[in-house]
Amino acid sequence: MTAVFFLFCAFGAMSQNTLIKVRVVDAQTREGIPFATISFGGPSGPPMQLTDDQGYFEFTFPRDAAWAQFDVHSLGYRDARVDVSPDGPVKSVTVAMEQKVEEISEVVVQALRAKEDAPVAYQNIGREELQKVNLGQDLPILLDQTASVVTSSDAGAGIGYTNMRIRGSDQTRINVTVNGIPINDSESQGVFWVNMPDLTSSTSSIQIQRGVGTSTNGPGAFGASVNLNTESFDPDPSATLTLAGGSFNTFKRNLEFSTGLLADRISLSGRISKITSDGYVDRASSDLSSYYFNAKYYGEKTSLSFITFSGDERTYQSWWGTPQSRLEDDSVGMFNHAVNNGLDSAQTYNLFNSGRTYNYYEYEDQVDDYGQDHYQLHWTRRLSETMKAKAALHSTLGRGFFEEYKANEAYVDYGLSNPVFGGDTISETDLVRRRWLENDFYGIVFSLEHQGRDLGLTFGGAWNRYEGEHFGEIIWMENAVETPKDFRYYNGDALKVDGNVYAKGTYDWRSFRFFGDLQIRSISYRTKGTNNDLKAYDIDETFNFFNPKVGFTYFMNGGQHVYASFARAQREPVRSDFIDAPADRQPIAEQLNDFEFGYRLQSSNLAFEANAYYMDYKDQLVVTGELNDVGASVRTNVAESYRAGIELNVNYALSGRWNLGGNWAFSQNKIQKFEETLYDYTNGFDVIINEYEDTDIALSPNSVGAVFVEYRPVTNLNIRLQGKYVGKQYLDNTQNEDRIIEAFFVSDLLASYTIVPQGTKGIDLQFKVNNLFNTLYSSFGYAYSYVFGDMVTENFYYPQATINFLGQVTIRL
C-alpha cells in the first residue's frame, strides 16, 4: 500500500516542527501492538520504521504542513491509513488496529469501554494476566490486587458467595456487563458471581473503570464499572484440559475447545466446568457447574455471534457472620450472645465448640440452589471504513430457591390458623421452607460508531425488561394438620423496564483530546403481592435521569499525559430499600457528581498513574449496620456525603527477569450528618435516635494497597509474591472505635512453569499459596446495637481462611 507522506509548501522545512506521537493498539484489548510497521509513501519519505515493544513510535513533521499521512501494517490486522494535522507542538494519535477476522462482541464492548487515553480512571486486564491467577477461585478474588478493591468470601476460601468493593462501594453500585450485556440483578442491583462459576476461563479481557466512568448499560455506576469480554479469536483448532485441587477439598475440572476458523467463515468454541469445595467456614460447601458456548460467523462486512453460558450452584449458607466473642474465644461474651439471641442448647453448643470457622446454620439442607442461563446474539455491520453499526439481543433466565429450617415458628406468621389437638391449641411449630425466585431478563443493546481522523462519535442505547416472581413454600411442618405440602405462604410479582440512550464522542485538537458523553435513562418499577412477612408491598415508581459527562486529555512529551473529567450518575433504590424502609422514611433516588484528575506515564519499562477523585453524593443510600432476613445490608438515605482520594499505580520492569509494581489508594469517606436508630427492648420497643456528624462511611477503609514482585529465573518459570493491605474499617456509620474491622496485610505466593512435550502446545503447572504467613483476619462484617437494660452492641465478622494451597495442571493441545 502506498501513501503520500507530505503535502506542504516549498518553504515548509524552515518552519517549526510538530512532534507526532503514535501508539498502535489492538482495537479489542487496547493493548499495544509491538513491532508494527510504519511506512511513508514515495522514495523521498522517511524509511520504514517499527513500533517499540509497547506499540509506540514518534516522528517530527513541519507544523505548517497541511497534514502528515502514513500507513500502519501488522500481521493479522487490517492495514490502517492515518492522517494527522500537525497543528501544535505535540500531537498524540492512537491507531486502533482491527483483526482481519471481524471481532463480534468487541464492537458492543468497545462502545462501553473507556478508550485509550480517556479522561477516566481505568485498568485493562488481559487473558494472560487472568490465567496466571485463575485456579478456580471466583472473579472478585482474582481482581483483589487491582486498585481500590477490597474482596471477601462468605465461605472464607474464595469459592461460593464472594463480593468486592471498589472505592468503598459495594456490588450494588458496581455496574457489570458481559459483552456489553447488563449482569446486575434488576431488583437488588447486586452481582452474584456464584451464578457464573468459572466464567473467568472464558474471559479474554476485563476493563475496570473506577468512579462513574463512561455511559454503560444497566444500573448506573456509583463506584465503578467492570466490563468482561468473552470474545477471542484463534485461527487454529485447540483443546485444553484443566485439573486443579487444593485445601478444603477444593477441586476444579475444566475442558475447553475451539475449532479455529472453518471455511474462512465460521468458528465454534466452548467450555464445561465443575468446581467443588467444602469451604473454610463450617459446612460452607459449594457445588458449581457451568458451560460456555460461542458460535461465530464472519462475513465480509457483516458478522454474527451466538453466545450462551450457564451456571448452576448449590451452596451451603454461610450468610451470617461470626460473633466477635467467638473469634476472641470470650466465654462470657458467647454466653451473653446466646441469651440475647435466644439460642437453644444445641445452637449454644455449636457456638462454644466451633472456633473461628463457626457457622450459625446446622440444618443439613440449609442451601442456596439457583440456576441461571444467559443467551446473547451479537450482530455487527461495517457501513464504511469509518462507521460501524452493532446490536445485540439478550435473554437471561433464572430460577432457584434457598431452603431453611425454622424452629418455633408461629402459625399466624404464615397465614395459618392455630391447630387444636385434644382441646389444646398449638401456636408454634418447626418447619422447613423454601423461598423462591423465578425471573426473566431480556432486551436489546445497540450503537453506531464513527471514527474519523480527529472526531470519534458513538450513539447507542438499550432497552431491557425484567419480570420476577418471589414466593415461599413450606415443604415440611412438624404439625402440618391440613396444611398441604409445598403450601405457598407468600407471593409477589415485579416488573421493571429500564431504557437509556447516549451520545458520546472525542475530538482531537492540537495536543488536546476532548471528551463528552450525554445519557438519558428512564426506569419504571412496579410490584404487587406480599413479602416473606406477609406484608403487602406495592411499589409503583418511575425515575428519569439525565447524566452528562465531560473531560479532556492533554498530551505531553515522553509518553505522558494529564486528564480531568466530570461525570454525573443517578440511580434508583433497590427492592430491599423499599421493603426494609420504615413506613415514614421511604427511599429516594441518589445522585453523584464525580470529579477525576489524573496523570499517566508510559514508557518501555515503566507505567505510572496518579489519579485524584472527589465523589460528591446527594441522598446516598448507606448501610445502617443492620441486616435483613436474607443477610443483605439495610440502607437509608443521607443528605450529604462524599468520597475523596488519591490512587497511585506503578509497574516497573527492572530487567527481563524482574518486574515490580503495586498500587495504593488514600481516601476520606464521610457522611456530614447521620442518624442511628436504636430500639429499647426494656421499655416496649421505644425508639432512640442518636445523631452524628462528619463520620466515616461504613466499610470504607482510608487506605488500601497492593504490592508485588515477579521473578522469571528461566524462560518458562515465573514466581510472584504479592501482598494486600486494607486499613481499618468501621462496621457502621457511627465511627465508633468498638465497631471496627482491624487493618490487615495478607500475602500470596504464586508459581507457574510450562513444559512443551512433543504433540502438545504446552503443559502449564501452577501453584498458589493463599495467606502465606497465616494471618488471622476478617475482610467484611456488620454490627447492630440495641438497649436491653444497658446498651448492647454485637459485632459480626467474616473470617477468611488461614494458609491454604491450590495446584493446577493445564494441558494445551
Image (cartoon, rainbow, N blue to C red):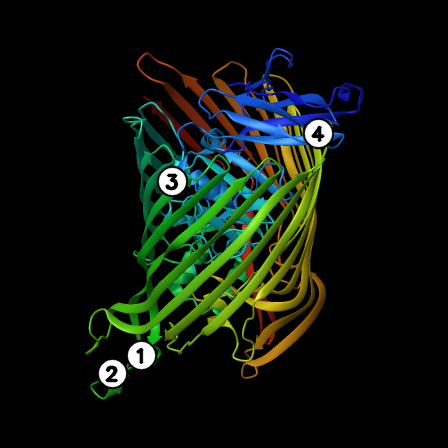
**Residue at which label 3 appears:** 198
**Residue at which label 4 appears:** 86
Callout 2 amino acid: Pro
Callout 3 amino acid: Asp
First in sequence, mark 3 or 1: give its number.
3
- Location of residue 410 in the rendering, given as x and y in whole percent from the top left corner: 34, 78
- Location of residue 227 in the rendering, given as x and y in whole percent from the top left corner: 49, 44
Residue 611 appears in the rendering: no
First in sequence, mark 2 or 3: give its number.
3
Cβ atoms under marks 2 and 1 closer than 8 Å? yes
Q: From mark 3 to mark 4, how far is it between C-alphas?
A: 48 Å
- Location of residue 117 in the rendering, given as x and y in whole percent from the top left corner: 63, 37
User: Dot 4 lies on which element?
Assistant: loop
User: Dot 1 lies on which element?
Assistant: helix
Give the quadrant of the C terminus.
top left
Q: Nearer the viewer, mark 3 or mark 1?
A: 3
Of 678 and 506, the residue lying toward us: 506
Task: Answer with the quarter of the image where residue 629 lies.
Answer: bottom left
Q: From mark 4 to mark 1, how far is it between C-alphas?
A: 80 Å
First in sequence, mark 4 or 2: give its number.
4
**Residue at which label 2 appears:** 419
Mark 3 surroundings within 10 Å by alpha-carbon count, few (fewer than 14), some (14 through 19), many (20 or more): many
**Residue at which label 1 appears:** 411
